[in-house]
C-alpha cells in the first residue's frame, strides 16, 4: 500500500568542502486510498494536501535513511538529460533536498533530487514499490539541480555565483504566507524582471547588460558577486514595474553563514519565579551563534570596529539599511553619501543621498512618516529602502518622549508581534526582572518569511542573552566584574565587547560590536558606542526586547530607554541557528 524509499548520499574526496546539515522530503501526500488506481493515471488528483519532513540530524556519507509514503504519481516528461530533469518537474512531484554548506564559497545550497523510476524524466512514486536512491556528490561543481537555499539573505564570497528559486519558501513562523506576495499563478505577483536596487561599489558591479543579476527562462534568479566584500539588495519586479520582493546579497570572504561554524552558546534558564543562576552555571543550551553581525564585511574573530559593523533593520522588516561607514561617532550624523558610503544602482551609477536621512525625499533612501498607508507590509515590500518613522515633525530624532511620536514608536501601524515569527506578547509566559525589564517566552521558534537572516539562521529570541552578565540582569556603572567579557577595564578602543559565550569568565569568546543604530527619526547615531541588538521577542505596545551594549562598561540584556527600545529603531542583528543543537 505504501512506497518504500531508501536514500543515501556519497561524498567524494573532491567534494569534502561540502557539509550536509539536513535532509528535507517535500510533497509527501497527506492522504491515500485503499484500492489501486490505473497505472497510467496521475494520483492523487487536484489540489491535494502535501507535507514536508525535515531531518535535522547530520546524515553521514553512505548512511541510509528509509521512509514510507503514499503513492505520488505525477507522470513523465520528454527530457533525456539527467542534469535538466528538475527544470520540467510537474507540480507537487516528490523530491528530496540536501541542505548543504560549502566551506569553499561560504554559501548554503539545496541539492534537489526528484524521485521516480529513472533519473531523467519519470516522476512516479508508486505504491508497493521500493526506491533505492543514491546521490553521488563528486565535486563542488553545480548544475541546475543545485540552488541556493531560500531566504531573504544570500551569502557568497567575491567573484562567486548563486542561482535560486524566487517562488519557493518554506518558512511558516507568524502565520505569514510567501505566496500572498510572490506567486507565478497570479499575473500581478509574477516576476517579470530583476535588477540591483542598491550596492556598495563592486559588490556586484554594472548590470546594464543583465549579466550579473538576471531571471532565466526557468524563472530562477542568478547573482554573480563582484570583487568587493559588502552588501547589496536586488529586487524582483512585476510587469507593471512594481517591486514584488527583494533580497539581501551579503558578500563576505569569511563564510559567516557556514552552519558547521556556528558557535555553541550557554545561558541561564528562567521561569515565572526568576532567573536560575545556581552556582553561576549557564545550564541552558541556547541557539548557536553566527560569528559576526548580519551584513558585516569581516567575520575575523580578532577584528573589531568598522569592518565588523553590519546592516541595521527596523524590527520585523526583512530588508537591510546600510549604517554609516564610520568607526566612532558620538552624536547624530547625516544619512548621506559622505557618511554611509558610495552606493550604486543597477547600472553602477551613484545613488543620490543629499539629506539628513530624516525627511521625506524623492531619493531612493527616503524617510516616510508612519501612517496607515506607509506602516504596512505591502508598502514596505514595494519600498524596501524607505525608513518608516513615527517621530513627529520637528521633534528630536531619538526622542525619549512618547508624546513626540505616533503609534507608540512603531513603524507598523496596527502593531503585530509576529512579524519575525514570535507569538503575541499578551499570551507569553513572563517574569518581571525589575521595572521595565520583563522576560517573556514569545520569541520565534519557527522562522518567518520576513526574517532577515540567511538560510539555516534566524533572529534570536529575547531571553537569549542572559548569560552575558553575572546574574542575567543589566550590568551598569562600568563594573566589569559583572560582565561576562574578556575585558576587565575600559574597552572603548575595541568599539564593542568580546563576550564569553559558554562559561563564566573563561572559554570561548565572541566579539559583539557596538556599531550604532539608526534612530526612530531616521538619523544614525553612536557608532562605536551603542550596540542595540534586535530580538524576535515583541514587548508591550511598540516596544521590542532589545539587547544593548554600551561601550565602555555596560551590558544590558534588557534595554528600557524609550529611544532605544521602540520597533521603528534600526538596529543590528546577530543571527542564531534556526534549530536547537
Image (cartoon, rainbow, N blue to C red):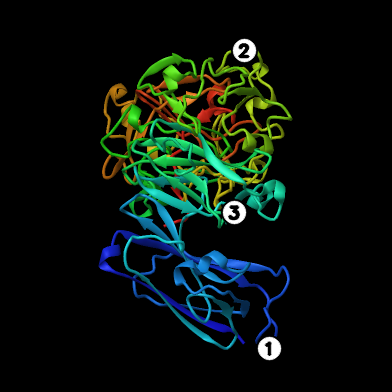
Where is residue 121? Give x, y as percent.
53, 75
Q: Which element type, helix, strand or loop, lies under badge 2?
A: loop
1 and 2 marks in contact (CB < 8 Å): no
Locate residue 373: give its quadrant.
top right
Q: Residue tagged by mark 2? A: 395
2 and 3 marks in contact (CB < 8 Å): no
**Quarter of the image where the C terminus is located:** bottom left
Q: Residue at x 63, y 50 (%)?
A: 178
Q: Closer to the camera: disc 3 or disc 1?
A: 3
Q: Residue at x 37, y 39 (%)?
A: 226
Mark 2 / mark 3, whichever is N-terminal: 3
Mark 1 / mark 2, whichever is N-terminal: 1
Q: Which element type, helix, strand or loop, lies under badge 3?
A: loop
**Quarter of the image where the N terminus is located:** bottom right
Where is residue 384? Give x, y as percent.
58, 34
Q: Which element type, helix, strand or loop, lies under badge 1?
A: loop
**Nearer to us in this view, 110 or 415:** 110
Q: Residue tagged by mark 1? A: 36
Image check: 554 left or right of 48? left
Q: Is residue 305 visible?
A: yes
Q: Which mark is drawn over residue 167?
A: 3
Which residue is at the far front? 209
Kindly report the distance in space between the C-alpha atoms of the residues bearing marks 3 and 1: 34 Å
Which residue is at the far top? 394
Where is residue 267? Give x, y as percent.
41, 46
Locate residue 42: give its quadrant.
bottom right
Kindly report the distance in space between the C-alpha atoms of the residues bearing marks 2 and 3: 42 Å
Image check: 440 left or right of 48? left
Amino acid at each position: 500500500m505504501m512506497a518504500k524509499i531508501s536514500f543515501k548520499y556519497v561524498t567524494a574526496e573532491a567534494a569534502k568542502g561540502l557539509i550536509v546539515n539536513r535532509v528535507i522530503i517535500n510533497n509527501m501526500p497527506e492522504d491515500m486510498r485503499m484500492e489501486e488506481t490505473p497505472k497510467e493515471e496521475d494520483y492523487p488528483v487536484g489540489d491535494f494536501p502535501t507535507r514536508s519532513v525535515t531531518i535535522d540530524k547530520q546524515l553521514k556519507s553512505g548512511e541510509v535513511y528509509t521512509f514510507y509514503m503514499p503513492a505520488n504519481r505525477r507522470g513523465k516528461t520528454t527530457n533525456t538529460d539527467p542534469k535538466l530533469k528538475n527544470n520540467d518537474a510537474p507540480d507537487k512531484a516528490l523530491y528530496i533536498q540536501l541542505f548543504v554548506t560549502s566551506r569553499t564559497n561560504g554559501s548554503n545550497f539545496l541539492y534537489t533530487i526528484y524521485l521516480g523510476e529513472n533519473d531523467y524524466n519519470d516522476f512516479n512514486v508508486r505504491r508497493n514499490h521500493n526506491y533505492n536512491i543514491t546521490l553521488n556528490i563528486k565535486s563542488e561543481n553545480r548544475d541546475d539541480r543545485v540552488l541556493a537555499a531560500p531566504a531573504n539573505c544570500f551569502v557568497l564570497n567575491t567573484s562567486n555565483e548563486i542561482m535560486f528559486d524566487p517562488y519557493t519558501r518554506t518558512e511558516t513562523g507568524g502565520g505569514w504566507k510567501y505566496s500572498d506576495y510572490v506567486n507565478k499563478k497570479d499575473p500581478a505577483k509574477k516576476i517579470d524582471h530583476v535588477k540591483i536596487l542598491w550596492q556598495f561599489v563592486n559588490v556586484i558591479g554594472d548590470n546594464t547588460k543583465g549579466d550579473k543579476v538576471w531571471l532565466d527562462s526557468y524563472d530562477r534568479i542568478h547573482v554573480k558577486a563582484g570583487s568587493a566584500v559588502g552588501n547589496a539588495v536586488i529586487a524582483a519586479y512585476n510587469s507593471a514595474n512594481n517591486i514584488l520582493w527583494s533580497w539581501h546579497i551579503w558578500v563576505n570572504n569569511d563564510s559567516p553563514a557556514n552552519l558547521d561554524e556556528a558557535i555553541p552558546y550557554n545561558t541561564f534558564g528562567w521561569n515565572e519565579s526568576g532567573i536560575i543562576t545556581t552556582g553561576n552555571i549557564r545550564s541552558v543550551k541556547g541557539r548557536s551563534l553566527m560569528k559576526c553581525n548580519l551584513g558585516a564585511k569581516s567575520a575575523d574573530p580578532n577584528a573589531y570596529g568598522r569592518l565588523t559593523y553590519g546592516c541595521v533593520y527596523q524590527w520585523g522588516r526583512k530588508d537591510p539599511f546600510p549604517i554609516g561607514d564610520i568607526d566612532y561617532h558620538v552624536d547624530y550624523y547625516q544619512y548621506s553619501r559622505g557618511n554611509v558610503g558610495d552606493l550604486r544602482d543597477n547600472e553602477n551609477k551613484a545613488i543620490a543621498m543629499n539629506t539628513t536621512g530624516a525627511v521625506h525625499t524623492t531619493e531612493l533612501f527616503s524617510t516616510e512618516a508612519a501612517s496607515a498607508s506607509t506602516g504596512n507590509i505591502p508598502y514596505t515590500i514595494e519600498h524596501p529602502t524607505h525608513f518608516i518613522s513615527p517621530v513627529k515633525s520637528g521633534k528630536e530624532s531619538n526622542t525619549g518622549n512618547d508624546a513626540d511620536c505616533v503609534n507608540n514608536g512603531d513603524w507598523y501601524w496596527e502593531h503585530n508581534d509576529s512579524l519575525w515569527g514570535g507569538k503575541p506578547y499578551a499570551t507569553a509566559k513572563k517574569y518581571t526582572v525589575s521595572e521595565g525589564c520583563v522576560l517573556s517566552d514569545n520569541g520565534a521558534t519557527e522562522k518567518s518569511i520576513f526574517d532577515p537572516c540567511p538560510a539555516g539562521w534566524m533572529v534570536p529570541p529575547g531571553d537569549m542573552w542572559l548569560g552575558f552578565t553575572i546574574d542575567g540582569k543589566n550590568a551598569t556603572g562600568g563594573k566589569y566584574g559583572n560582565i561576562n567579557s574578556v575585558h576587565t577595564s575600559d574597552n572603548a578602543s575595541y568599539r564593542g565587547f568580546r563576550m564569553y559565550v559558554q562559561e563564566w569568565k573563561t572559554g570561548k569568546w565572541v566579539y559583539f560590536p557596538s556599531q550604532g543604530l539608526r534612530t526612530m527619526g531616521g538619523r544614525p547615531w553612536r557608532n562605536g558606542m551603542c550596540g542595540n541588538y534586535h530580538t524576535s521577542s515583541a514587548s508591550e505596545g511598540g516596544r521590542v526586547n532589545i539587547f544593548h551594549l554600551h561601550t565602555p562598561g555596560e551590558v544590558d540584556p534588557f534595554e528600557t530607554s524609550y529611544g532605544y527600545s521602540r520597533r521603528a529603531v534600526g538596529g543590528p542583528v546577530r543571527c542564531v541557528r534556526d534549530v536547537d543543537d
